[in-house]
Each structure stands twice: as structure tokens, then as C-alpha cells.
Image: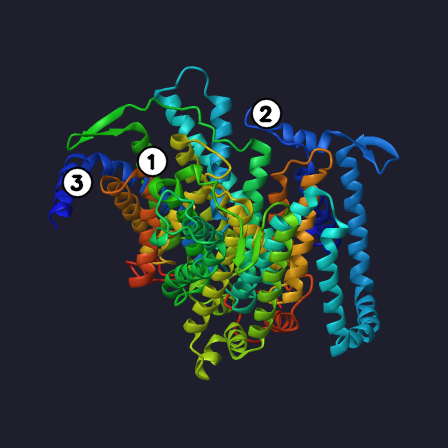
Amino acid sequence: MKRVFANAHVKRLFSAIAAMAVLELMTGPPGSALSPTAGFTGSFGEASSFFGLFRTQRWVVFLFIALVMFAIWTTWLTWGEQVRTATSKAMSVPRAATHTRPVRWGMVLVLLVVALLLPRLITDPFWQAAMVEQIAVYVLLALGLNVVVGFAGLLDLGFVAFYAIGAYTTAWVTGALPTAAPFGIHFNNFYAIPIAIALAMGAGIILGAPTLRLRGDYLAIVTLGFGEIITIFANNLYGITGGSQGTNTIPHFSLHVGPIKYLWGLTPVPYYYLTIVFVILFLIGFKLLEHSRVGRAWTAIREDEVAAESVGINPLKYKVMAFAIGASTAGFAGVVTASQSNTIFPSSFTLQFSINILVLVIFGGMGSITGVVLGAIVIQTGSMFLLHSPPAGYQPQDLYIYLGALLVVMMIFRPAGLVPSRRRHREIGLAEKGEGHMNEVLTGDTP
Amino acid sequence: MGAFGHYLTGHFATLRLEFWALFVGGLANGVLYGMVAVGYTLVYGVLRLINFAHSEIFMSGGFAGYFVMKSMVGNAVPSGIASVGLIVLGIIVGGVVGAVMATLVERVAYRPLRRRRAPALAYLISAIGASYFLYNMAGKEFGRVPISMPQPYINHPIFHIFGAPVQMYYVIILLAGAVMFLTLDRIVAKTKLGRSIRAVAQDAETASLMGVNIDRTIVLTFIVGGALGGAAGFLFGMGTGVSNTMGFVPALKAFTAAVLGGIGNLRGAMIGGFLLGVVESLSVVFVQAAYMDVVAFGILVAVLLFRPTGILGERLGRSA
């Protein structure tokens, strides 16, 4: 038995079948506590159409797909190297062409025009709302988390906490909470922006400073806990936060400058434009940051902390800085969401949310701003599409199963993401060759 | 000061009254935290990594135990020898399922990355993905509402300690915990497996030169940690019920316990667990029950601030 599994072909075949069995469960019908086997039997035994040709049971279809996968995989191992060199040769010409300045600025301009025209092209109310709430805001959040995970290489699993701080600050400043607004004045939402950023940043520093001195994975678990703690406080400090009911009286953004009077919120479209402006501002800011002294310091720390320290970079300072910048971006996004939806309640600030943002960054490509924006748009559009017109048997909560699996799959097959940051791609490559000091993990007795 | 003084005097009076009852409950919880913390510490020892999917190994043990109890316990609550048999069976099934899950997690989420020598961040992300996948998958298959487990015993007070009743549930946990901790301690200190775990934790490269099979040792470490985690999941589920998110908070606390005792330190993890359980339980006198999780989190941050190496210090790969 052991000898059979030592055969590489058998191993691959087994892996393909196992992967398909898992996929079968993921897409299959749900079970419940009363009938815990219903999900399993249904996933394998339910009748299904074999690519529209004839009806058969699900396991036959998936077994067929597994065999096809195995065939492709095996061929790829034989011919893959040639294919890869050929495509990279063919791609090098267009890639070189796009790397000239006028072409890139032209592309940016085209994308900008498309972004601005989008509400005219898409008039379906579901999608107009989704563009603001689920896509534009998430792009903003992903950009913020990218500073933490991508630039500084730190894992933040409590991103939602800072988002919640931003949202609750908005409610506080505009006088929507049971607790009195500052100075008894109900401020305009725009005033909430600097306050929320400052508070989220402060929370980031308080949480980051003690934790970031230590091993990287402590930050992950402390932020994970912090995300949970924030919800407990929001739920129980009834007199301050409104408890589990939260509040639903947050006003919309409004502008009163001299003769100009404008109130956002009648349709999602004005919010779309407002958010797009914010996204562009953050995009420019982070792009500048990436190549600044600070950005280079992050890269140095990420690649080799000891070496960075020896040339005079204070790792703690720069790590806390990255963490605080990420936190304040989340706080800012909290202001936008709270104003746009008028409502906040503790149960919307969940771990699911933090992980969702992490998936956007990982899928797009850690450290690659283009990648992260693209990743956020692709994943969020995909999940909205699943929500809007779900395929047969799909439940809304199934999304999280896919997102979790996606994280593992990305880490195994494409850790640098969809559009890899060139720098990050190189680092991972170097680490895999055993160079650099990113490797703290035991690699076993393999070559 | 006056008002605060009154607050303290009042609460200390309550503490004196309730101390032993809270202590026993806290110690039982602490044993469970310790059992899960051992899983974190063992994996940390060999891989220098926090296994984020450990909370789902705990959950899988809980569900396995639930299904066993559901099929075995009838309408009448069993007692005597039947009760003991059922609990032992539940612990074994929970442990086996936990060990299997831990092996699967190692296979799918860790080993491909180890083969590729991926950077540490990749492991954390992969483990988070696995954890997220598993608990949502469990939610899909077994429902997303908490379910209470059929009781295989009658939960009456067995004896009194300083006037505080000690319930059957606590006795079971304390007994099971004692047996498992002693066994584990001996395994790590005396057996060949324990020696190879310690060797890999001390210096993996040298260990492999000395003929230790690293891959095998890592899998066995996951199995040992997973078995304890799964058994703890069953014991926890007997009292609190099972759900797909049951692992989240206990695992966070177990991690706190592991850090409190000194991560990588086996006895430290157990002692950290007891201490955290008791402190957390006693804190109920001073803060509302809703903030109990906040207390554990506060302890975690305080330990990281003031003594990041924990009480006993980080000691990788020593026999005790």
C-alpha cells in the first residue's frame, strides 16, 4: 500500500480525486444537526446533469472532472516548462510595451473614465448599491490592509476592529449614540473623518507597540482577539454604544459651504463618486508611500530584519507605522460605511469581515497596489454576483467556505497573488531557494 | 478613594464567600485550556509556528463526541459503569477525530508550503484559510446553531471542598486531564517519539543528521496535539454544547495560556492553562460575566508586554 502511494502518478490522482470530493461537499446541499449526513449523501448521491448530456449522480460528474484534472496536471508536468518559457517570451513584448510611461498613464486615464462612467452604464439598483457598499469601500479597505500585510509583511486579523472604531466615531461625532457628542455639538460627517482616523490610528499604536516587538505571529493572534473584544464592548456598553441594537440615526454626508448645499444619500450614485474620490486619494498616497523612504524601509525589514536594523532602520517604528496606517484606513472606511448606511450594530463587525478583506489582498497580490485593487473588484463582484443570482443550491454563507479554501489554494499555488508585486515575487522566489531571512519555518528533509 | 475602597471591600467579601466554588470551576476550565494549549506549544516547538487551525481541531473533537453521545445515550441518563464507558469512548473518539483532522491540516495547509520553503507569513495565511474553511464547512454540514450534547452522566455534586460542591462534570474533567497530562509528559520525556520531538525542537537540522525523520516527527507532533485538542473539544462540548464556532474563544484562551506558561514549554502550557482558568473564573467577582473574555485578552496583552517569555520561560525541546 505504501509503495503504491509512493508512486507520483498515484499520488497526483489521489490528490485530484480528494480535491474534487471536497469541492463536491462545498457545492453540495447543506445538512443540519438533526440530519448530519444529509449534506454528505446529497453532495455525492444527488442526481446531476452530466454537462447537459445525461443525468447521473454527482460523484460521477466530479470523478470525471478529477480524471480530467489529473490528465491536465500530468501533461503540464511534462510540457509545462516549455509552455511557460514560450508564453513568457511572447508576453515580454507587450509587457515591455506597457511599461513605458505614456502607455501606463493612458491606461490609468482609461480606467478613470470607466470608473466615472460606471453608474451610467450600470443602472440596476442592486448593482449600484453594491458598487458603493461592497466594492468601492472594500477596495479602500483592501488598500489599507495591503500596507500592513503587503508592505510590512505583518498579519492583521482584527482589521474589523479599526473599521468599527471608525464607524462608531462617526455615530458619536454626529450625535447618533446615546452618549453625548463632543462639546454637545452634532458635527457634520466630514468632521468625523480626521477624528476617526486619529482614534483608529491611536488604537493601532496602542495595540501594535507592545505586540510588534515580538514574533510576527503574536500580532496575528492579538489582533484576532482585539477584533472580538471590540464587539464585546460595543454589545455591552449600552449607555455609550447603544448595545446590540446599535444606532440607525447617523446622518448622511452633507456639504454647506457658502452657497453650495448638498446632501448625499438619495441614491447610491453620489456616494459612489464620493468614495471613488477617497479611493483615488488613498491610491495616490499609498503609491507615493510605497517608493518613499518609509516604503523602502518596510521592504528592507520584510526581506531581512537583522540587516535592516544594522543599517540604522528601527524595525519597531516602521512596523508600528504600517500597522497604524492600515488601522486608520480602516477607520476611514468605517466613516464612509456608517454614513452611507446610517446604521451600525455590533454584529456586523465580525471575524468574517476581517478575513474577507485579507482574501482580497492575498488573492490580488500582497504588496501590489494594482493587484489588490483588481483582487478586491474581482472577488467582491463575484460574491455579489453569487448573492444576486445564486446558482442552484447555493446559500449565502457558503461564500466563506470558498474564501477560506481560496486562501489555502493561493498559498499553495500562487503565494504572490493574481498580479504579483515584482519585488514580492522575487522575495518569495529567493526564500524558496533558501536565501534571505524570511525563513523561520522548518522546511523538513526535502531538497 | 472612598467609593473605590468600598467597591473593593464589597467585592473581596464576595470573593471570600465564593472563592472555592469559582476556583473549582476555573480549574476545570483551565485543564481544558491546558489541553488545547499543549497542541499549540508542541507544534510551535517543532515548526516555530502558531497553528491557527487548532481551534477547528478542537471543534471536530466536539462534534465527534456529540455524534457518539447522540447515538449511544438514550432517554434515560446513564450512570455507573455505563457512564464511565461512554465518557471514555467520547474522549477516545474525540481524540482520534482530532488527530485525523490535525494530520489533514498538516498535509494540506502546511506540507506543500514546507516543501517549497515558503516564508512564515504564508503558513499563517494558509492556516487561517484552513481554519476558516473548516468551521464554515462544519456550519454547512451540521448547522450553524449551538446544540447541547446528551449527557452521559448525572451532574450532581460528588464531594465538597471547603463547603463548595464539586460537580460530576468537574471531576470528569480533572480526572481526564490528570491522566492525559501525565501520559503526555511521560511520552515526551521517555519515549523515542518524545526524544525525536525534542530533538527537532532543539535543532531540526542536526536532528535530521542524527537520523530523525523530520516529516514523520512533525506529523506525529500534530497527531499528539490534535488528540489532546479533540478530547478537550469533547469534554468542553459536554458542558457547553457544540457549534461550528465553538473553537474560537477557547482556542484564543488556550493560546493565551501557552504564552502565559512560556510558548514551546510543555509544562508551562499546562500551568498557564490552570492559572488562566482560575484567574478568569475569579474575575467574575469584579467584572460582569460578559467581560470574561476581555479579562483573558487583557492577560495576553499584559504577558506580551511585561514577560513575553511567559512564567516558565520559552524552553524548546527540554524534557520538562
Comparing labels 2 and 3, the label whose residue is closer to the camera: 3
- Circle number at residue A35: 2
Instruction: Identify which amino acid the numbered label 1 is placed on.
Output: Ile
| The furthest residue to the top | B76
Q: CA distance from mark 3 to mark 1?
A: 29 Å
* Residue type, numbered disc 3: His
Would residue B22 be seen by someone viewing this image from the given angle?
yes
Q: Which mark is residue B173?
A: 1
Q: Quadrant of residue A370?
A: bottom right
Rendering coords of residue A32 (x, y %):
58, 28
Q: Secondary structure at mark 2?
A: loop
Which amino acid, by three-letter code, is at mark 2?
A: Ser
Picture coordinates of residue B301 (x, y %)? Answer: 34, 57
Q: Is residue B261 left or right of residue A359?
A: left
User: Considering the numbered disc 1 on the image, is that residue within a helix, a strand or a loop?
Assistant: helix
Q: CA distance from mark 2 to mark 3?
A: 48 Å
Marks 1 and 2 belong to one chain: no
Classify residue B209 as left or right of residue B20. right
Mark 3 residue crowding within 10 angstroms, few (<14) / some (14–19) / many (20+): some
Q: Chain of mark 2?
A: A
